[in-house]
Image (cartoon, grey):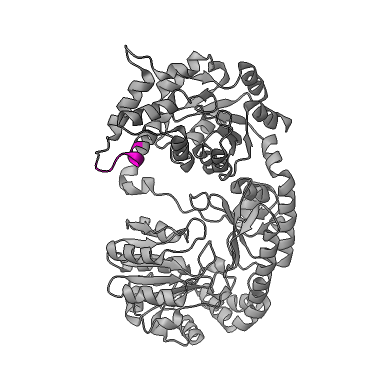
Amino acid sequence: MARYIRSDLKTLPPYTPIKPFDVVAEEIGLPISALIKLDANENSYGMLPEVSTDMISGQFNHIYPDPGQTYLRTDIANRHGIKKEMIVCGSGADDILDILIRLVPDRPIVTSGPTFGMYSFLGSVSKRQVIDVPRDSQTFQVDFDKVLSTTIASHATLLFLTSPNNPTGDIIPNETVKMLCTKLSQHCLVVIDEAYAEFSSTTCLHMIDDHPNLIVLRTFSKWAAIAGLRVGYSISNPLIARSMDIIKQPYNVSSVAELAARSALKNEALIRTQQIDKLLEERVNLYKLLSSYEWIHPVPNSQANFILCRISTMPAWLVASTLRAKGILIRYYSTNHLVHYIRISVGKPDDTEKLKAGLDSIQKECVSSYFKSLEAVLWDMDGVLADVSKSYRTSILETAKFWGVIATHEDLEKIKNEGNANNDWVVSKRLIDSKIEAGRLSPTLQEVTDKFEEIYQGTEAVPGLWKLESLVPSIELLKKLKSAFPKMGIVTGRPRHDANKFIQTFNLTEFFDVVVCMEDTPKPKPDPSPVKAALDALGVTKAVLIGDTPDDIMAATFAKIGGIGALVVNNDNPKTRAALEKCNPLATVNNLQQFLQILTEH
């Protein structure tokens, strides 16, 4: 049946939504009443009773709803002091996003991540190029100059920005919005998603009359606590709104949802005093709580109903999964920008207290509990099983030297510590390119590969450097580990013939049930696919991977298993230690006896 389906959908990463209460409760094995839901930024106070009463009072639910949401748009217009002709309603703000993408010419969309994932997802569904201008990896500040230049250079038709931003909580100053709208007035629409505006003091709604290319999005999901009913809207120039209305689904807001949204507007003052103000007060308390833990680093000044936190000394996914097992649901992202972060929605005071109890127990039990549940041990090969300082590493330096580049082991270690360095042919090329004299032509990757292989494998005249490799762990230690963990595997970036040669040379076959090599997955570490392939082959989900580079630890993290940093060959290099520990391994060991002790003492 695949011939009937668009081929590009095969590689489209699915959007990962938050699971509903009942599904999560069944998965965890706890009653719904025991769950603390802090993962989706909903209003934890729930629908106001007055709104609920109005919602169920509808008399005409057996007929189609108003296709133009006439009364709802009138109420929204009165709320903001604008014309109702500027408003388009949708089944949540996501519906509006989809309408906008279909509205404009088929050219790129620009975003600045980390941000709300629906922009890129809906763009990809519509076969649009989505260009992300990354935020600063430490401060999450947007590079607005680069956003501007990228939008113009790419001839983009849409620029999506969120204020307050999800998941970072920061706002876009109105002066910046004004600058973008002015300089992009002949280029594209500037869409400011204000889904969390009711928790902030900043909005750019008043700027639309002066900037006809500005569109502001709002939703009832967050502040009004009707996320399950799906009501959102856009405010824009009337011409844009009219064009959006032409292509939207006519009955995209149900009668029940419209009644609830209108009632929320009627009772907004009550929602403000009984819910929003309390959530804003609790946001302060939550920030203080999170800041009290040495291993939690909340991003300051959130203007939304959530707080993003960087986790140190342990994997962020482990914190999220441990809390989940206790019935406390928070958000974890397995993306490059946010792999060390969790996002926690602001809840009621009782929710914060239960979160505190969960965090207190994590501080004592988290890593230890994970070790106790281990099913398998995975090994990186080079630098952990094999001492390659005189083989692979020297082959890289000698390959560079062939092209006149004199480099040191410290230069090589720097590249390894920077990450994305699991392929030694690529590392050799990168080292050469970084140091080759100006004006000289750099060799191709194939040329570098051929020279590396000549040095490593050897020729009839010159023996290969692979002969200088030695086994790091003793056979006795491997026997002890195999006895404690019958399932063991290797995940290496080596070609299979090199990996097999090392295993056979040192008689290691009996210890390892699976060996995943370069050829076995489309991407190398730090991509999780090699680790996942080993886990699948072993039939396990809970394991540790011991490795000597950041790529190893990150591959484990992306695969949601524990990483163990290994300084078993190069254990006197503080920069390597710092690079490993920055990746939040479960532990960092100086020798493999220490690794055995950590695994078996739990």
Image quarter (top left, top right, bottom left or bottom right) of the N terminus: top left
Q: Residue at x 32, y 65 (%)?
A: 149
Looking at the image, residue 491 sits to the left or right of residue 41; the answer is left
> In the picture, which quadrant includes the C terminus?
top right
Q: Residue furthest top?
A: 460
Q: Residue 93, how many percent across, how many down? A: 46, 68
Tell me, yes or no, whether the highlighted magenta stretch contains residue 269.
no
What residue is at 49 percent from the left and 87 percent from the top? Answer: 78
Residue range corresponding to the magenta coloring: 432-439
Query: How far across and how far down the image is residue 342, in percent?
Result: 59, 54
Q: Nearer the viewer, residue 579 or 599?
A: 579
Q: Nearer the viewer, residue 503 or 124?
A: 503
Q: Please, is residue 208 above or below residue 370 in the view?
A: below
Q: Is residue 320 above or below residue 466?
A: below
Number of labels in the image equals 0
249 vs 568, left or right, is left
Q: Is residue 417 left or right of residue 224?
A: left
x then y, percent, for residue 276: 63, 75
